[in-house]
Image: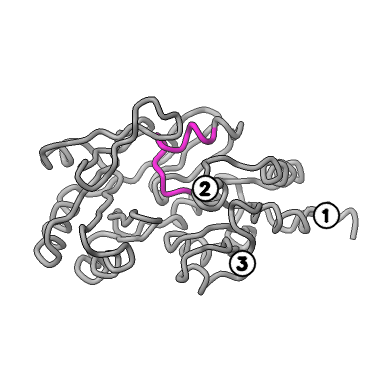
Amino acid sequence: MTGGAFPYGLVATDLDGTLLRHDGTVSSRTRDALKAVVKAGSAHIVVTGRNVAWTKHVLDDLGYDGLAVCGQGAQVFHAGEHRLLTSVTLDRRAARHAVDELEAELGPLWIAASRDGTDGAVLVDPAGFPVPAPDDDNSLAAVPYNDRAELWAEPLMKLYIRHPELGDDELAEAAHRLVNGTVGVVMAGPGTVEVLPLGLTKASGLSIAARRLGVKGQDTIAFGDMPNDIPMFRWAARGVAMADAHPELLAVADEVTAGCDDDGIAKTLEPLLAGV
């Protein structure tokens, strides 16, 4: 068919393990497919668990100047203007209470905290979170702390939690059970169990960004690879999981494409663009 329209008004892509290959780059084939989507009159939005400070350098490298949803939906960022449009913070009292409840049941945790703002630092317990080398362009500034009081000194977006013995899925399941209804908990990737404001998801942030663009979930195709992408898939008309996605996401996906290292996004978009 020729002369048709691209069937979606919005393409939403997770970042790590989806748009980014495992070496931290985006292939020229995927870049070209997304450029063609925009040329066809649709929008592309990056939707990531990373905060803005850990995302904006990637967007700059892509030449991306649209909206991005960061921090699991907490931040809507205008990449072209380097301006934060919305921000949702984590209640620090609720977060401290959740940590106390978890440690009372599970024993000591390693905790990191992502601060609010476009340049929000990530404070890390060096015993459980590696501190990136300062000259590594692909790593982002992480500030080690010695006293947990530092975690609660400034507004936060979220916490990262790790356990010395429990795996990611086990820890996420235990946290859901123990603190459900007080804070949100999501498994966002290897070694990345997060404590979030209650009710916050990628879908909530994406819906805000989409409204600004005049598009709806029924107009959206979404790509992802981890359980934190499940709300986004449920919001979108079509959810496409990467080949190596987490089993929980595969269970709700409408289809499965190739992995991020094998141009999975491009392989899905190219047939949709063929008649445009």
User: How far across and how far down the image is residue 175, in percent?
Assistant: 24, 65
The extreme right residue here reads 2
Chain part drawn in magenta: 47-59
Would you place residue 235 above or below residue 34 in this image? below
**Residue located beneath label 1 in the image:** 274
Pick whichever of labels 3 and 2 is earlier in the sequence: 2
Q: Quadrant of the N terminus?
A: bottom right
Q: Residue 72 versus residue 227: which sits nearer the camera? A: 227
Q: Nearer the viewer, mark 1 or mark 3?
A: 3
Q: CA distance from mark 1 to mark 2?
A: 28 Å
Would you place residue 189 above or below residue 143 in this image? below
Q: Residue 7 versus residue 165: which sits nearer the camera? A: 165
**Residue located beneath label 2 in the image:** 22
Q: Magenta includes 244?
A: no
User: How far across and how far down the image is residue 3, in percent?
Assistant: 89, 53
Tags 3 and 2 touching, CB below 8 Å: no
Would you place residue 187 above or below residue 61 in this image? below
Would you place residue 119 above or below residue 12 in this image? above
Amino acid tagged 1: Ala
Are there few (<14), some (14-19), or many (20+) residues within 10 Å of tag 2?
A: few
Amino acid tagged 3: Val
Are there few (<14), some (14-19), or many (20+) residues within 10 Å of tag 1?
A: few
Are there few (<14), some (14-19), or many (20+) residues within 10 Å of tag 3?
A: many
Pick whichever of labels 1 and 2 is earlier in the sequence: 2
**Residue located beneath label 3 in the image:** 256
